[in-house]
Amino acid sequence: MMHLANKRRWVIWMVAGPILVAMSAAGAARAASDSCSAATVVDVGIFSGNTSAATNDGAASCGGTNPSPDEWYSFTPASDCLLTLDTCAGGYDTVLSIHSSCPGTTANELVCNDDLCATQSNVELSLAGGTTYLIRVGGWDGASGAYTLNVSCNEQPPSDDCADAIVIGEGTFSGDTLSATNDGSASCGTSQTSPDVWFSFTAASDCLLLIDTCGATWDTVVSVHSACPGTSANELNCSDDACNTQSRVAVAATADSTYLIRVAGWEGATGVFPLHVTCTPGGRPGGGRIHRGADGVRAVRPRRRHRGMRDRLAAMQFGYAAA
């Protein structure tokens, strides 16, 4: 028998549907799955697929992708890690989403991204070891085609200090303050000495940066700062209770500026949290002067003059903005 040790082997499995080639040292090929319930099991690596012959078997909250043909992958990390997925190598206008179960819907969606690298997608999510996650590759507004999927899952970088803040983009992220120490302060929520963790967001364009921990089960405090160390002096916004006892803040972000996000707890509270981040072009909704409400969220009081219907709707929709 011939042994091909230490050599790359390329295998293509032909199937009735799409073709998937897994490119790794082992070189094992896998057939891409057209259904969530039969999702192709993958590990870290680089995979290629094609949704042209796929049907629709799921939905996501971004990219107008609900009727789009999609393919599904299943990923189970051996230990806690930060999963990074992207289709940035090129291809058609993809939409990536991660789900907790099948069928994959907006209700069990954990994160979704449409355009982050040109018209391709990139998502990150903190994963729990031993838990299975479902990955959906769809297309914008029904688009389909060939794509390359990069999968990596690395040890979560330290975020206990502002200087080591985890770099994030738009999406849903998870974290906890259970073993964190204090490395900052804020003006609301009596959180000056609370354990905290830090995230860093750089705006690609002028936008309204919206951040919340809605859905957490403990009393969070979220603040946004312009520099490290994060203090009340460089705080841009702070929120204690905006969605029950969880937090929601907004900042009128400027293109290429970096914002430091602190997640802490009321009077020393700690726990696990989701962090939802969006950045909507258009800046501060409605204009007007800034007012801090009783819940710690700075709200916009719209100007009475020179305000169009678009501004009224924006003010009604968001109801708050930061200086």
Image: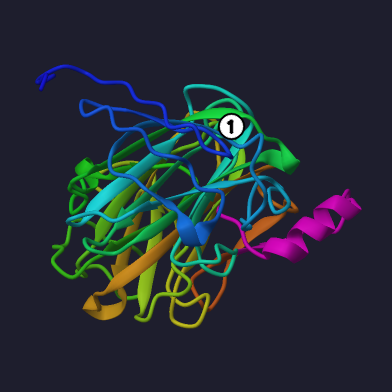
Q: Residues within 10 Å of mark 1 (few under 14, many from 20)?
A: some
The answer to whether residue 194 is left or right of residue 232 is: left
Please indicate, yes or no, whether residue 199 appears anywhere in the rendered image: yes
Figure quadrant of residue 220: bottom left
Residue at image position (22%, 66%) is 177
Q: Is residue 99 magenta?
A: no
Q: Which residues are magenta?
A: 299-323
The answer to whether residue 154 is left or right of residue 233 is: left
Looking at the picture, tell me which residue is in the foreground, 168 or 12.
Answer: 12
Q: The residue under label 1 is which amino acid type?
A: Ser
Looking at the picture, tell me which residue is in the foreground, 156 or 99.
Answer: 99
- In the figure, 105 relative to 261: above or below? below
Q: Is residue 317 magenta?
A: yes
Q: Which quadrant holds the N terminus?
A: top left
Q: Position of residue 28 (x, y in %)?
A: 29, 32
Residue at image position (17%, 56%) is 79
Please indicate, yes or no, whether residue 232 appears anywhere in the rendered image: no
The answer to whether residue 188 is left or right of residue 53 is: left
Check disc 1 and report the residue beneath it.
205
Q: Position of residue 247 (x, y in %)?
A: 46, 70
Residue at image position (36%, 79%) is 219
Q: Position of residue 180 (x, y in %)?
A: 15, 63
